[in-house]
Amino acid sequence: MNVLVVGGAGYIGSHCVRQLQAAGHKAVVMDSLVYGHRKAVSPETPFYDCDMADRPALLEILKKEQIELVMHFAAFAYVGESMSDPLKYYDNNVAKPLSLLQTMREAGVTKFVFSSSCTVLGEEAEPPFTEAMPLRPISAYGQTKADVEVILEYCAKAYGMSAAIFRYFNASGANEAGDIGEDHDPETHLIPIAIQCALGQRKQMYVFGDDYPTPDGTCLRDYVHVDDLSRAHIAAFPKLEEEGVLLKYNLGTGTPASVLEIIKTVEDVSGLPVPYELGPRRSGDVPAAYADSKKAKEELGWEPQYPTIRSIIETAWKWHKAHPKGYDDRD
Ligand code: UDP
């Protein structure tokens, strides 16, 4: 299949490109490089520095590369920023994908894969989260993801577009080869922050709250390897042959880990201390979020190849240790 990966120079997109290539598909990358890294895409991969809302340029790419399916990873994903600047998020995460879908229609491309997030589910949802739960996001970011999910439902019904929606839990880890990985600026995620502390790049970190109703008082999350996420997306391709199909899958290992467990595992894997202090809760954090991924397992035959937090952190550690400055350290 000829696949256009929008946001293919970002963290999850770049891993998906490698998995597509390993599975024998042709991956074409389009990325505006606002947050993406050119070095995350191999020189042999067709690459377009282009905004998804540039309709004439996108139309030409879709035609020239004979694209059959579009995967969309180019969302902004800072929850806090989405609350202080919601219009930025509605523009990039709703208006631009809308333009992308319109251009796809113009080009006659009918298959779409959308990276959504467990944040579309509300605060009151009880884990494990299933696909049947209603959309009740509590942040502008989560709302933009939910909006695109709903738009896709209408497009599937009205135009026969086939779409697969994947709701990620905590995407983590790096590819086995160790040449691509997580590199966000600013970095807000737990695993890279703990690793940066182990490497001495940060003096210490804060654990955001230890008074949650969880076994050790810190938040429980479902950390899932980026390559496992990518494999689930590709496993859905045959189902997208059916016109008008709309698929939704939650992707997580289903086994949550606490903040303190993550810190301890980073210490074990690195053999180095992670200095931390207990701090106040971070606004918007729910005590526990983890997936029920039974549907993806049953319908796609998906099984995480990195089922434990240790196996995930080992790959992240390898990447960060070899590239302490992220892509700035890569040839
Ligand atoms: N967290 C923390 N200290 C940090 C960063 C994150 O205690 O410096 C906690 C955060 O409160 C949450 C968990 O780690 O409970 C995972 O946070 P992350 O931002 O990685 O992902 P999220 O679950 O928010 O998408």
Image (cartoon, grey):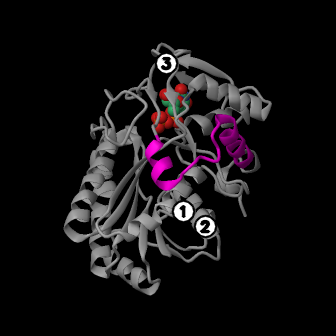
Q: Position of residue 139 (x, y in %)?
A: 31, 38
Q: Is residue 230 above or below residue 215?
A: below
Q: Are marks 3 and 1 in contact (CB under 8 Å)?
A: no
Q: Nearer the viewer, residue 183 or 84?
A: 183
Q: Are marks 3 and 2 in contact (CB under 8 Å)?
A: no
Q: Is residue 244 above or below residue 126?
A: below
Residue situated furthest left in the rendering: 158
Identify the disc placed on residue 135: none
Label 3 within 8 A of ligand 1 by Cβ? yes
Mark 3 and mark 2 lie on one chain; the one further toward the N terminus is 2
Q: Is residue 17 among what the camera can see? A: yes
Does the magenta portion include 295? Answer: yes
Q: Amino acid at mark 1?
A: Ala
Q: Position of residue 215 (x, y in %)?
A: 54, 15
Residue at coordinates 38% horizontally, 77% vertically from top-left?
Answer: 58
Which span of residues is magenta-colored? Answer: 293-320
The residue where tag 3 is placed is: 209
Residue at coordinates 57% horizontally, 67% vertically from top-left?
Answer: 20
Q: Are marks 2 and 1 in contact (CB under 8 Å)?
A: yes
Residue situated furthest front in the rendering: 298
Mark 3 and mark 1 lie on one chain; the one further toward the N terminus is 1
The residue where tag 2 is placed is: 41
Callout 1 secondary element: loop
The residue where tag 1 is placed is: 9
Q: Is residue 278 above or below residue 183?
A: above
Main SS class of the magenta portion in the image: helix
Graded by Cα atoms within 10 Å as few (under 14), some (14 to 19) or many (20 or more), the crowding at tag 3 reads some
User: With 265 as the anchor, is 48 left or right in this view?
Assistant: left
